[in-house]
Amino acid sequence: MPAKSNKPLLTVPDPALDTPALDDPELCYSYEIARGEMGVLSFEPYKSLILPYWAFRTVPIARNSAEVLWAIFQSYVQRGDFVGADMTRKYIQMGMTRAKRYANHKGGRKYGADGKQLEKWSGDDAEGKRKDKQEASELFKGYWRRCTADSKYLELKKQWQKEKKQYKPKS
């Protein structure tokens, strides 16, 4: 039986998280969609706003985190903040990939300090950690697919890309 966490469940932020990119074109268009999760841990202030809601240690924690991040994603989409929505999508994607990495590699690290690939799990582990991480990854994957298929999000993305091409930063 897994140890119970004393950490309270995450809740959807009320009031909704700030939308700094809506008020600052320079911030908005300095954002890069990039590949996968690139920039998710460095693009401020969104990193600091969203990061506290990202967790994947156990299946219940991952489920709670994914549900809260999905609500944050929807809130950003509804308010027309593509940058906030895309950053939240990246955290959901990162939940999927990081949990999967822990499912595949003991300790969650692919490479050691020497650059050599570390040991992978072999067979089933006694405590079910591998299965737990795989399930957490699948939870996030479902929400990630919902994000990438959301028609309003895709509309915002297309509009943002068009506007970014036309944006001329102040000198």
Image (cartoon, rainbow, N blue to C red):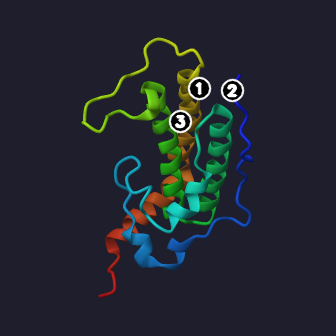
* Residue most extreme to the bottom: 171
> Amino acid type of disc 3?
Lys
Mark 1 vs mark 3, foreground winner is 1
Mark 2 vs mark 1, foreground winner is 2
In the figure, 164 relative to 97: above or below?
below
Read off the residue under disc 2. Answer: 2
In which quadrant will I find the C terminus? bottom left
Do the CB atoms of the residues marked 2 and 1 lie less than 8 Å apart? Answer: yes
Work out whether mark 3 precedes mark 2 in sequence or the reverse, and give the earlier one.
2
Q: As rendered, which of 19 and 61 lies closer to the eye?
A: 61
Q: Residues within 10 Å of mark 2 (few under 14, many from 20)?
A: few
Read off the residue under disc 1. Answer: 132
> Amino acid type of disc 1?
Asp
Q: Position of residue 54 (x, y in %)?
A: 58, 49
Q: Position of residue 152 (x, y in %)?
A: 56, 55
Task: Write the residue at 53% across / 23% down.
Answer: 130
> Residue 141: which disc?
3
Q: Secondary structure at mark 3?
A: helix
Work out whether mark 1 precedes mark 3 in sequence or the reverse, and give the earlier one.
1
Q: Marks 1/3: CA distance? A: 14 Å
Q: As rendered, which of 133 and 113 lies closer to the eye?
A: 113
